[in-house]
Amino acid sequence: MELIIATLTNLLILSSMYILVALGFAFLFSMLGILNLAHGVIYMLGGYIGLTLITALGLNQWLALLLTTLIVATFGIFLEKYCFRPFVGDFNRIVMICVVITVVLQTGVNIIAGTQILSLPPFAEGIFKIGPASVSYERIVTFAIGAVLLLAVTWFVNRTKWGQQMQAISQDLEGAYLQGINVHRISALATFIGCGLAAIAGCLMGAYLCLGPFMGDFMLVKVLMLTIIAGVGSIGGIFIAGLILGSLDSVLPLLVSGAASNATAIAILVVLLLIRPQGFFGHEVEL
Amino acid sequence: MVNVLLEVENITVHYGKSIAIQDVSLEVAEGSVVSIIGANGAGKSTILRALSGLTPLTSGEIRFAGSRINGKSATEIVTLGIVHIPEGRHLFPYLSVLSNLKLGASLRKDKAGINKDLEEVYKLFPILRGRRNQKAGTLSGGEQQMLAIGRGLMAKPKLLLMDEPSVGLAPIVIEQLGEVIKDINKRGVSVLLVEQNVHLALGVASMGYALQVGRVVLQGDIATIRSSNIVKKAYLGG
Ligand SMILES: Nc1ncnc2c1ncn2[C@@H]1O[C@H](COP(=O)(O)OP(=O)(O)OP(=O)(O)O)[C@@H](O)[C@H]1O
Ligand SMILES: [Mg+2]
């Protein structure tokens, strides 16, 4: 019983965090064709900024979470404007720029914070009990934040004017320009949201698991796998792919020990992709 | 004396090093329909792309309602009332018909006006009303063309630029398209129509231009165009 609940909550948390980070990556990729390989370090940066605001400045951790989100989201706007937009369509240069951003941020964090494993204080304490079952409030809160954010983003993309314009840009860029859509502003907005979400995930994961300068690499691999499984297109595909990855990462370690579980997960994904190289969902899944 | 709405003066456009149009000048009078005809690659679409801010000019000037618009962004140009229905439609294939139409009104804030124009579009193309929740990409070619026109109208244009709207349509539908263009024009929208279907182009317009390898080779009222040897030889079969 304990094990089932622990696995299930872990599954939900991992899935929602993967999806949160993947959304920002997918926005940039589908709207501007930019492969933002720096998205992982942005997630990492979020975690460390959150920790710094809490420990060095002594801020309340919810306030720290909010501030971190705004700081990293604003950094996203800067990235979009100076690092991505001038090079749209120039794949090689974008990859180079992302590698540079990754190296600079990783080394910077490494020098300032060191390689030791740190973590944010938990966002909630105590244990929630119903009958024989018990779950830590931290898990509940972490998943709840993830779930609310995912619902909010889905609503935003499908129901608001700006969200519709984001979709328009990703489906036909020239068509979007011709409707007068301010492509630059909407791309900046999408990057703002995407980086903000990654930062929140970084803080939550930094509390739920831990922080390390290279946590972004791990997440980037997840995000890439997730995007490949989903196929570019709908948010729905990203959600399903996120759940698949989260399930693999939470269930497999019970069956296969240690690093072998990661290898098994990748092997399963490779087989899936051999069956459907274009990804599984694309625009087929509506939300 | 009718006001000139659009004045294009000696514009030249390059793609990279190759020249697409050279020293093209044309005018659209307020309230009129003007056609541009020309063979594949003559530069017709390039003229429209230059007008809507998609492609920069190498030289020349474009004035709309008396003020210079070349160099302005696509967004600013739509705000001024120049709306371009592009070749190949460029619909948003995974969004519904209704979403596509609403995106046509991206820059408008007058909710009531938008809803009124939506009704107008549905009146013009009743088929779109029935299919408003269907994804644009699943419409037939003709329906997609109607949607592209409807989406353009949702921006409340003063000048509509239409690039080969007849492509892929059955002859009877092309005839209806001619009526639609006249209808749109009657509502006070000026139209600059690019067409390879010369019958349609000459049927709805009052003025015409013929383009050959990037240059205007003929211009004038429709009677002049119709009787010109160039057009007769190239398009009207004799
Ligand atoms: N993006 C581009 N890059 C390079 N050359 C281009 C580009 N677009 C058009 N051209 C060239 O510019 C010239 C004019 O093209 P344009 O599309 O304006 O012709 P068109 O008259 O609209 O032809 P069609 O009737 O086939 O649509 C052609 O020679 C074309 O090959
Ligand atoms: Mg053309």
Image (cartoon, coloured by chain):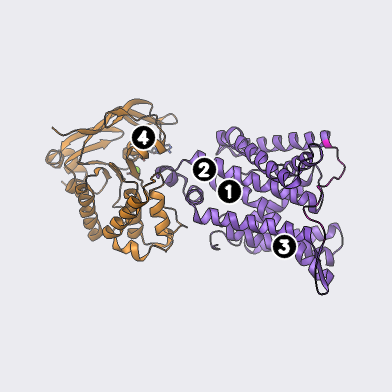
Q: Amino acid at mark 4?
A: Ala
Say above or below: B213 vs A281.
above
Q: Which residue is mark 4?
A: B50
Chain at numbered mark 2: A
Query: Disc 1: which chain?
Result: A
Whichever of callouts 1 and 2 sits on the residue coming sooner in the sequence is 1
Q: Nearer the viewer, mark 1 or mark 2?
A: 2
Whole-Å distance between the Cαs marked 2 and 3?
A: 31 Å
Q: Could you say which is closer to the camera, residue B231 or residue B64?
A: B64
Residue identifier under label 2: A186
Which residue carries the number 3 mark?
Answer: A12
Please, what secondary structure does the residue beneath circle 3 have?
A: helix
Q: CA distance from mark 1 to mark 4?
A: 29 Å
Q: Position of residue A251 (x, y in %)?
A: 79, 65
Label ID, residue A27: 1
Magenta segment range? Answer: A113-126
Query: How far across and down, in percent of the image, does residue B145 sit?
Result: 33, 55
Q: Which chain is orange?
A: B
Chain A display color: purple
Q: CA distance from mark 3 to mark 1?
A: 22 Å
Residues at marks 4 and 3, CA–CA distance in whole angstroms: 51 Å
What is the spatial separation of the Cα atoms under label 1 and label 2, in whole angstroms?
A: 11 Å
Tell me, yes or no, whether the two marked residues, 2 and 3, touch with CB atoms within 8 Å: no
Work out how far the residue at label 4 is from the one at label 2, CA to CA, in angstroms.
23 Å
Name the residue at the top extreme: B59
Judged by depth in the image, the label closer to the viewer, 4 or 2, is: 2
Amino acid on which the number 2 mark rests in the picture: Ile
